[in-house]
Amino acid sequence: MRRSIRYGDERIAFTIRFMPRLGLASQRRISISVLPDGAVVVDAPQASEPQEIVAAVHRRARWIWQQLAAHKERMRHVLPREYISGESCFYLGRRHALKVKVSSDAAAEVKLLRGKLEVTTSVSDPDTVRRLLDAWYRKRAQEIFARRLPEVADSLRWLKEMPSFRLLNMRTQWGSCSPSGILCLNPQLVKAPRPCIDYVIGHELCHLKVHNHSPAYYRLLAALMPDWEARKRELDGMAEVLLNR
């Protein structure tokens, strides 16, 4: 459900997501988030009235406006990708220079070589280079997330069975957890530092026990990862660059 409110001379648009009741631990409060791409999302209990949700957004309007203003300021410094030699690419939190090699008789491939991401291709158009890089990031993400998931989950004594995960490119999220317990992780997350990757995995794992962002959920997350807020801040600060495709 889409709604908007007026704040001064600006209009703040937001999406409402109604959270299903899942027993005694179901969500009992309205939670407002500003996602990495600047989208405003409101998670509300299933039984919430729209006017109640809008009133909650009005109460947080100043905070939302500040987050959106900070997002716009960060975006001023994010240039559109051209996929040409010399551009910066990130992998595991480190910046690497992109090098595009055009060769009509060499196999198309991507290598991380001496601090550079080297793309070999028979044609140098941006779409081809982007597709090759996306495939390389996806393969690295599958490998790294498969290693990190059991490492992070090992501390969760209440977790009876290791969940599966799948990769899903998302514009507004680093991860999600389905009601059936399957984790979805954004392959672009592999560009972030390992502590940030572990934060997202831990965040989604905790949703297997508490399916909302209630105080009980954040207590669970803090027990798993006491410094989760610092990791989240670091990831939020890089989001515009890492998600820039």
Image: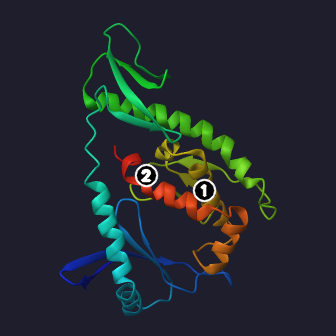
Q: From this viewpoint, is residue 221 visible?
A: yes
The residue indicated by pointer 1 is: 199
Asked which quadrant contains residue 237, the reply is bottom left
Above or below residue 103? Residue 33 is below
Which residue does the image show at 39% across and 49% down from the upper left? 243
Residue type of the residue flagged with mark 1:
Tyr
* Neighbourhood count class around disc 1 (C-alpha, 10 Å): few under 14, some 14–19, many 20 upward: many
Give the x, y percent position of residue 10: 21, 78
Q: Identify the secondary structure beneath mark 1.
A: helix
Q: Name, please, the residue furthest toward the left.
A: 9
Q: Answer yes or no: do the residues labelled 1 and 2 have beta carbons within 8 Å?
A: no
Asked whether 165 or 228 is in front, the reply is 228
Which residue does the image show at 57% across and 65% down from the upper left? 229
The numbered mark at residue 238 is 2
Where, quadrant-wise, is the N terminus in this rendering?
bottom left
> How is the model colour-coded?
rainbow
Give the x, y percent position of residue 30: 49, 83
